[in-house]
Image (cartoon, helix red, strand yellow):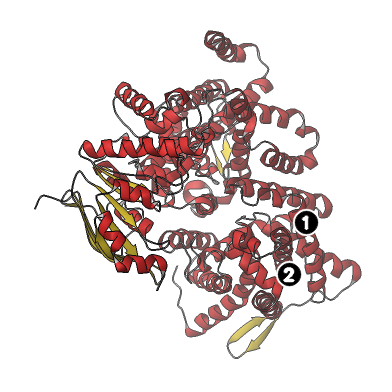
Amino acid sequence: MTRAFLGALGVALAALALYPFFGTGYGVRATLQIFMWIALAGSWNLISGLTGYVSFGHVAFFGAGAYAGAILVAKVGWSWPAASLVGGVAACVLALVIGYPCLRLKGPYFAIAMLGLNEVLRALVSYFEGLTGGGSGLSLPTLDATIPIYYVMGVLAAAVTLLTYLIITSRFGLRLMTIREDEVAAEALGIDTARHKLYAFLLSAAGPGIAGALTARDQGYIEPISVFPLAMTITMIVMVLFGGKGTVWGPVLGAVVLFVSQEFVWARFPYLHQLLFGAIIVAVVLLMPRGVLGILQMKYRLPRTI
Amino acid sequence: MNVVITPVMIGQVIISGILVGTLYSMVALGLALIFGVMRVINVAHGPLLMLGAYATYFLYSAFGLNPYLTVPITMLLLFVVGVVLQRTLVFRVVGAPELASLLLTFGISIALVNLAQLAFTSDLRAVEYLTGSYIVGPFAFSKSRLIAFVFAAAVSGLAFLFLQRTKLGKAIRATSQSREVAMVCGIDVDRIHLFTFGLATALAAAGGALIAVIVAIQPEMGGVWTFKSFLVIVLGGAGNYPGALLGGMLLGLVEQLASLFLTTQLSEVVAYLLLVLVLLVRPTGLFGGRQT
Amino acid sequence: MATAALEIEGLRKSFGGVLAVNGVSLRLEPGRIYGLIGPNGSGKTTLFNCITGLERRDEGRVFFNGQPIDGLKPYQIARQGIGRTFQVIRVFPELTALENLLVVTQGDRAAAMERALELLRFVKLEGLKGEFAGNLSYGQQKLVEFVRMLMRDPSLILLDEPAAGVNRTLLNDLLDAVRRLRDQGKTVLLVEHDMKVVMGLCETVFVLDHGEKIAEGSPGAIQMDERVIEAYFGR
């Protein structure tokens, strides 16, 4: 079983690695997008799926990485791979500054504080026009790097998934879950919940930060509303919920299924796009809060590493 | 930026702050009721306010009704919308973890905004009914804002009297104290939830109706109201209804004061810092509140 | 006098004007079993919460093995060697029985696994180690919570109503386990409503009423104490 799975995984990874050589331009771009969503959804899963602290503004880290990377490329003349790494670092620094006070907030208050953070960052980048181009956005020098970015984003998606696997199978990961299950009991057992939450939060910020910087480079242009949309946070949450939160492959499954259906089905109804998205959110929340893999896990007693 | 602050400017800021703050209070009271009674954060509160604004706009432009006369009609219409939403969707997430209610109401929220875009287009629309200001000494009172203040104060006052004096109002407060105790006391909690969501939506709708006369309206106008309303109930203390009224005033004053020194964008940042600070230092709100 | 396992001096805690604990002082000698009784609302659980850092006391001092522990965070207090159970069971429902124990330890994984299995065997739950704790029966969950608390090998053990909702056989096992822990030199303080349990197990009993300690002594003496009778049966 395990060997068969690993074999299939190897074939899939090899196919994805070779895909740019025979795929269409559209296909490569779409797969690149799927990689991005896997990285984003997987990262959200690390903080919210494991600890239960709902980050309702996780796209803030994507946007922070995008601006950090774009400014380094456009204003300082860095190469995009280095700028992308700094994008990840910038997101982690932001997570440290925000997480230290805000992770003390419980339940809905943490969610709202994160929502507010996103709004504030959008306001701030609009305000500092000299650096960010303000509301009119920031253009990067022309460069066709879609194929290298495809590979880097693919590695990022794989890294986030691997990280999730390593965490979930470790006692560190179990301790993160005790925070979700019963934070008071965890404290009384000697678990330093504040530190654990902060570590998970930092780990969950790095991926979106790098993904943001890569996306900024790939698209060549960013503006406040394009990198801080609340809908993007919601999309990653719905992907994780659909696939199964707290599992390794849930975010991957959710990202693939939701992205593909968005591309092929919703694109046919451009005017109803948002309405359909709203309906899907409602349906996932009401009908399958545990997600596909969560339901299978409960029913067939599978390990969390699915 | 060098600004000379004169006493007249301060006076004007206080007046404007109270005028707009009363609107905040009324709208936030709705969100506070839903949160207090059901522990649901209704992200769709702002978009429901937007629907209220459109209701008034069409009653005014299609039937030629005086926009202020539309306020009760709009409230009644949106009361029904609120009841329907609660009856069909929201009741399913009462008592669920906050993620469920946040996402569900967000789903409702973008569906409403999209429906509004389809039905009304994204064009800016305005109810041009009352413009200009009353000048009293050195101070100026925008006419539409002054009347909005009077309406908002009256509606909030009535809602408050309703909560304090009537049997249904007391049942709502009892339910927000403890769902279990309310049930044991023979209160039909589901019916209370239904009514609460309707009432809260009507309060948002009243806000929408009044705002329609002040500024141009469009489908995406609601989001900022959700956030401001949440800020108000954090300031006032969750489950503390008089606190929500004071919190609205405070937000209005802080915003107006900040606008003397800062751009709109930076005053949003100030509002956020205020939110986080209050949450960290006084999680029960500035005016005391129930422990959560 | 030897260092007390736990010493509380003038502990006071109020919630919004209501005094839950009003100037309580206690002294626990090492290697003994103590009972804490009192009518509902007399402040027993609040006292536990103040000792373990879950509530911040208003006044007073708490010493553990002679060292002040007031002001420390709950996890720091737990790491010093105070373990507790809760009145309402607080297992981690979506972790397995074994995982419930494993999370407590850091460092050597093999040793942790060995200790966790040994403790599960101790309460005859080894066969259910892979079951989600939330799927276990009430009594089994209670046992998981009990041995989970032992993972850190605490020297002071606080039990909040260990007998509530547990059947006779299970209860006797649990009480035996508590005696064995005492024989290993651990100190036990338990809140309990079941007087039979308190009288049969405890060497010294403290009685709380309205947040104040109204009596202290051997179980026999406590049963005769007029203030205790008054507190329980009214005047």
Residue C189 at x, y percent in the picture: 29, 49
Chain where mark 2 sits: B
The one of A204 and A171 positioned closer to us in this rendering: A171
Residue C28 at x, y percent in the picture: 21, 52
Q: Nearer the viewer, mark 2 or mark 1?
A: 2
Q: Are marks 2 and 1 in contact (CB under 8 Å)?
A: no
Say whether residue C11 is visible.
Answer: no
**Mark 2 crowdedness (10 Å alpha carbons): few <14, some 14-19, many ≥20:** many
Sequence-wise, the earlier of marks 2 and 1 is 1
Circle 2 residue: B206
Q: Secondary structure at mark 1?
A: loop
Q: Are marks 2 and 1 on the same chain?
A: yes
Q: Amino acid at mark 2?
A: Ala
Q: Which quarter of the figure has residue A234?
A: top right
Q: Secondary structure at mark 2?
A: helix
Which labelled disc corresponds to residue B123? 1
What is the total number of numbered labels drawn onto the structure image?
2
Q: Residue at x 56, y 72 (%)?
A: B252
